[in-house]
């Protein structure tokens, strides 16, 4: 067997192994539909929550009269929670109900900005 033939066999085996990993892993949709936090370590100071690969809300640890609260800011509302886990629970309850709401508004804003840019070009 030539070295070219051996290299091709190695590449085929590598490709087969990569395909097996891709096929057995979660789909892109399954990964996107999980609400994730972005930023410092959980609850440290601030960052964002992300759903479907889009930042849907900002979170920030704030000082309050009772200690600390987690402030959640989105285009829809500003809310305060006792813990970071409470904030995540809010977004993920009822099959990500609030994450989907926030995502929908972000998408609407993005589309309206695109429409504004197109009308400016006319």
Image: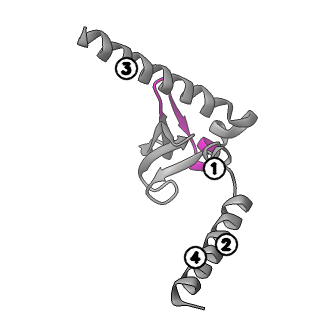
Give the residue pinned by disc 1: 31
- Rendered location of residue 25, percent (x, y): 70, 60
Give the alpha-carbon distance from disc 3 to disc 1, as whole Å: 27 Å
Foreground of the two, 3 or 108: 3
Residue drawn at x 41%, y 16% is 112
Regarding mark 3 in the picture, which secondary structure is present there? helix
Disc number lying in front (1 or 4): 4
Instruction: Name which of mark 4 and mark 3 comes first in the sequence.
Output: 4
Q: Is residue 107 magenta?
A: no
Disc number lying in front (4 or 2): 4
Relative horizontal placement of residue 2, taking residue 89 as reference (left or right) = left
Instruction: Name which of mark 2 and mark 1 comes first in the sequence.
Output: 2
In the depicted structure, whether residue 18 falls above or below residue 105: below
Foreground of the two, 88 or 32: 32
Give the residue pinned by disc 3: 114
Give the alpha-carbon distance from disc 1 to disc 4, as whole Å: 28 Å
Residue drawn at x 58%, y 86% is 6
Give the crowd class for mark 2: few <14, some 14-19, many >=20 residues within 10 Å.
Answer: few
Residue 11, numbered circle: 4
Residue 57, numbered circle: none
In the depicted structure, whether residue 97 falls above or below residue 86: above
Instruction: Name which of mark 2 and mark 3 comes first in the sequence.
Output: 2
Q: Are marks 4 and 2 in contact (CB under 8 Å)?
A: no
Give the crowd class for mark 3: few <14, some 14-19, many >=20 residues within 10 Å.
Answer: few
Residue 17, numbered circle: 2
- Rendered location of residue 73, percent (x, y): 46, 33
Give the crowd class for mark 4: few <14, some 14-19, many >=20 residues within 10 Å.
Answer: few
In the depicted structure, whether residue 34 falls above or below residue 90: below
Q: Is residue 85 magenta?
A: yes
- Rendered location of residue 80, percent (x, y): 53, 35
In the depicted structure, whether residue 106 falls above or below residue 69: above
Regarding mark 1 in the picture, which secondary structure is present there? helix
């Amino acid at each position: 067997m030539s070295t070219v033939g051996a290299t091709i066999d190695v590449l085929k085996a590598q490709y087969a192994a990569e395909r097996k990993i891709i096929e057995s892993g979660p789909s892109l949709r399954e990964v996107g539909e999980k609400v994730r936090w972005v930023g410092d370590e959980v609850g440290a100071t601030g960052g964002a929550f992300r759903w479907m690969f889009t930042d849907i809300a900002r979170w920030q640890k704030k000082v309050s009269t009772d200690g600390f609260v987690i402030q959640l800011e989105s285009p829809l509302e500003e809310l305060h929670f006792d813990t970071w886990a409470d904030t995540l629970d809010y977004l993920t309850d009822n099959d990500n109900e609030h994450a989907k709401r926030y995502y929908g508004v972000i998408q609407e804003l993005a589309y309206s900005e695109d429409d504004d840019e197109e009308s400016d070009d006319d």
